């Protein structure tokens, strides 16, 4: 299968080297970070098989995701990827920790680590600003600190939150992101942890299989909240990127929301047009984990039920256990969708130009 004009991976997972991150922290935070303090409320649901691919290791035993050179050589080069958005792992517990000042400091150090130690190594890397929910003022400060960096392309948050993201508590984040024209990405992993709500809308689920299967329910909740509570009337240029939330649930949710809105407009007088129209303008989805029915025609029919040509972007999730390579993702798409999904939509969302940074 021929490569499209470009490939932009919207979800690549590096892991920071803790000793190096600690160098960007002052005491007393530095010592806590070095001792492995990952924020109050950790851990998350446990995957008995591990989250990282076992083969993400170089011949000399180094983990590929821990080094910008190995990630570039063993993944970007192998699949001829033009850009990759870095969404750091093993740090997101801080997003929902109630220990606000320590977590904000830790995430700020992580952000600086990737900006200073990954971006200069390879011009294909693009960075996210990871922020915590427990102190919105500190999160806003972090957006202002890095928001105008030319290779910082989004603000990264957890999909688990203390209450749904349409709430006015979060609006200062949206105002700050809008000032820099940065989309806000939400990534799964923290439902039921720290100050985040439970890992299922009916309450706490029992294990990783349940949590992982039900990830889409967090995204449904966040989408409906953001639309119904009028976030995009207040911030008309804002976009959200739903990373690793699945795809097939979206059409049914838009149909249901439109139908209910017609009868219940009095509850949301600020919504003056169909919710589905707002969703099409302000939300992006990523391909991984792409649904895999026995008959792939059924999945392609789902892509016809919403504006996938405008709303869907490729993501590998490398090196996670359930990641998808570019060639696998392209096989799931009709030919008329491939260029849009593999790079065109990401170029627009992240404000990139062809050949702007790529080597």
Image (spheres, rainbow, N blue to C red):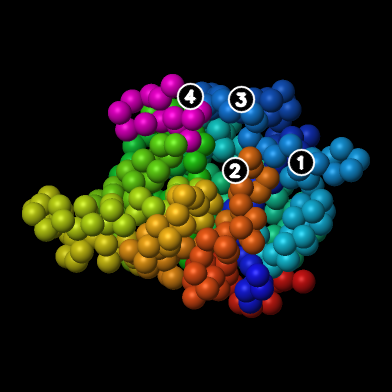
> 30 or 60: which is nearer to us?
60
Does dot 4 land on a helix, a strand or a loop?
Answer: loop
Residue at numbered disc 1: 55
Q: Is residue 200 magenta?
A: yes
Q: Is residue 88 visible?
A: no
Who's the residue at 79% across and 53% down the image? 74
Does dot 2 land on a helix, a strand or a loop?
Answer: loop
Q: Quadrant of the N terminus?
A: bottom right
- The answer to whether 125 appears left or right of 166 in the picture is right
Gap between marks 4 and 2, in whole Å? Answer: 17 Å
Secondary structure mainly formed by the magenta segment: loop
Q: Is residue 12 magenta?
A: no
Gap between marks 1 and 2, in whole Å? Answer: 13 Å
* Residue interval drawn in magenta: 199-212
Residue at numbered disc 4: 207
Q: Quadrant of the C terminus?
A: bottom right
């Amino acid at each position: 299968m021929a490569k499209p004009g470009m490939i932009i991976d919207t979800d690549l997972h590096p892991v920071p080297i803790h000793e190096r991150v600690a160098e960007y922290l002052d005491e007393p935070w530095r010592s806590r970070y070095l001792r492995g303090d990952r924020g109050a409320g950790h851990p998350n649901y446990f995957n008995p098989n591990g989250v990282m691919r076992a083969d993400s290791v170089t011949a000399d035993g180094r983990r590929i995701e821990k080094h910008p050179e190995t990630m570039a050589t063993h993944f970007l080069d192998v699949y001829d990827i033009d850009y990759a958005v870095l969404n750091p792992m093993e740090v997101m517990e801080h997003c929902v920790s109630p220990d606000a000042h320590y977590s904000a400091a830790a995430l700020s150090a992580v952000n600086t680590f990737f900006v200073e130690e990954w971006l200069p190594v390879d011009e294909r890397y693009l960075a996210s600003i990871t922020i915590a929910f427990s102190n919105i003022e500190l999160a806003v400060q972090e957006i202002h600190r890095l928001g105008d960096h030319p290779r910082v392309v989004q603000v990264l948050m957890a999909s688990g939150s203390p209450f749904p993201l349409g709430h006015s508590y979060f609006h200062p984040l949206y105002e700050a992101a809008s000032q820099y024209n940065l989309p806000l990405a939400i990534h799964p992993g923290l439902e039921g942890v720290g100050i985040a709500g439970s890992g299922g809308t009916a309450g706490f689920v029992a294990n990783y299989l349940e949590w992982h299967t039900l990830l889409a329910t967090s995204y449904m909740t966040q989408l409906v909240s953001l639309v119904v509570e009028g976030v995009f009337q207040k911030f008309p240029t804002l976009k959200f990127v739903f990373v690793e939330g699945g795809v097939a649930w979206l059409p049914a949710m838009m149909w249901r929301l439109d139908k209910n809105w017609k009868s219940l407009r009095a509850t949301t007088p600020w919504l003056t047009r169909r919710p589905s129209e707002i969703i099409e303008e302000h939300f992006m989805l990523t391909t991984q984990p792409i649904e895999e029915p026995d008959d792939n025609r059924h999945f392609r029919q789902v892509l016809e039920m919403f504006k996938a040509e405008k709303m869907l972007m490729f993501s590998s999730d490398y090196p996670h256990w359930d990641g998808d390579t570019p060639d696998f993702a392209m096989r799931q798409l009709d030919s008329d969708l491939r260029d849009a999904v593999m790079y065109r939509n990401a170029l627009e969302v992240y404000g990139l130009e062809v050949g702007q940074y790529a080597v």
